[in-house]
Amino acid sequence: MFRKLHLHLTIFCAAITICILCIFTALYLYIAENTLTDNHYLSFQHDMDTLCTNLEQQITITHQYLLKLKQSNDYLLFLWDNDQPFYFNSLNYSEEYQILAEQIKSYYTDTLLPIKGNDDSAHHEFIYEDDNNRQYVAGIAQIYPGQLSAAQILAARSNAQGLTLLAIYPRESFLEQLKAQRMWFILIAAVGCILLTAFAWLFTRRLIKPLQENQQKQIQFVSDASHELRTPLAVIRSCISVRPPNYAETIQYECVHMGNLIEDMLTLTSLENHSQPLVMEWIEADTLLLHIYEEMEPLCLEKSLGLSVILPDEALPKVRANPMRLKHLLLILIHNAISYTPPKGQIALKASHDHKWIVFQVTDTGTGISDEDKNRVFDRFYRTDKSHTGKEHFGLGLCIAKEIIQAHKGTITITDNPGGGTVFTCCIPL
């Protein structure tokens, strides 16, 4: 089920992010191509303007000058005088380019000029596409060499004494540049899609990992609870069928045992689901510890254990907590210490504080907890001593203690007692 869910979430997450990536890539490519095309066209206009200016400043246009002008530019230059081509055209360009120039000039005269009309523009630039779908940027201008004033230019224009200049730039290299740019964008987008898919796979796996762990814990919880309930039920059935001596007391004991287990399970569920919000009150920590000491001292004496309370000389500040839950937490830790501390051992209940926390510690001189078990003692139904079969413990106490301390926004830690045994430290913010 989780494998299928992982796959579906990966596809969904990857599809959304890839669609966003493709949209933004296409948008950026469109803007980049338009910007590049506009810059290329503006550059050609600027060069065309420079060519016209240079030619108009010449009194005599020689072949050597035109050849030098051609070599200093990447453009194909053609000139006509009253529609008669210069000898320069046929001398420097093949017949194919001469025909192309005549076609572009005719296209401008027959098609574009009627649309543009007789405006005052010095030159006109346009895109021309031949029969083979090859594109050219073309610029055509009417120039009047040797005219030094505006009046002379107007007179030359009225007498049709100007020259026609045509500059052609093949767009193959520019289109190849656009094609290479598109290929880079496609490659980057493809790599991005692969990386996003890998990220979606890892992200969704991390996302559903808590769900998997929670399901496994639920399955384990049901299995452990069933196992814990099976034993008292088997004892009750045996007593009913065989009816040994004192069977009624045995049934009552097992019923109490089952009731305690069910009560612990309900408490744990209530804390985990926050179904019953804790009512916080300001309580005196030292008074709480003294009450717990009076309540637990007879049990410790019965087990031949010493119980002590260690309080600082100054009064402890009040702490905001739920009195019943906080007392339950400390009782769990003391009961746990009693169960794993041999006779003649010592258990200490200590409280202290700093500016931010009030600290409760339960110290024992018992068997201690291994480093491996320290990471698992807060799991449900986990017991450090697998051979410990006392029915007063179900392996839920420390799990409940952890939920209580977390409900108070505190922490609980386990350390080794230097003299042997364990120290449980609970910190609750002031």
Image (tube, rainbow, N blue to C red):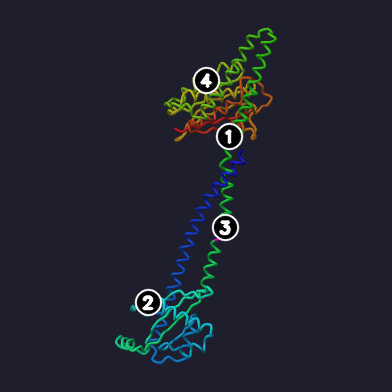
Q: Is residue 187 magenta?
A: yes
Kind of element beneath mark 3: helix
Numbered disc in front, either 3 or 2:
2
Amino acid type indicated by mark 1:
Asn
Q: Which residue is mark 4?
A: 293
Residue named by callout 3? 190
Say whether residue 382 is magenta. no
What is the C-alpha distance between the residues marked 3 and 4?
Answer: 69 Å
**Mark 4 or mark 1, which is nearer the start of the sequence?**
1
Residue 368 found in image quarter: top right
At which x and y percent is residue 53? 39, 83
SS assignment for the magenta stretch, majority: helix
Question: Which sits in the foreground, 82 or 417?
Answer: 82
**Residue on which disc 1 sits:** 214
Q: Residues within 10 Å of mark 1 (few under 14, many from 20)?
A: few
Mark drawn on residue 114: 2
Between discs 2 and 1, the one toward the N terminus: 2
Region of the chain picked out in magenta, as a range: 186-190
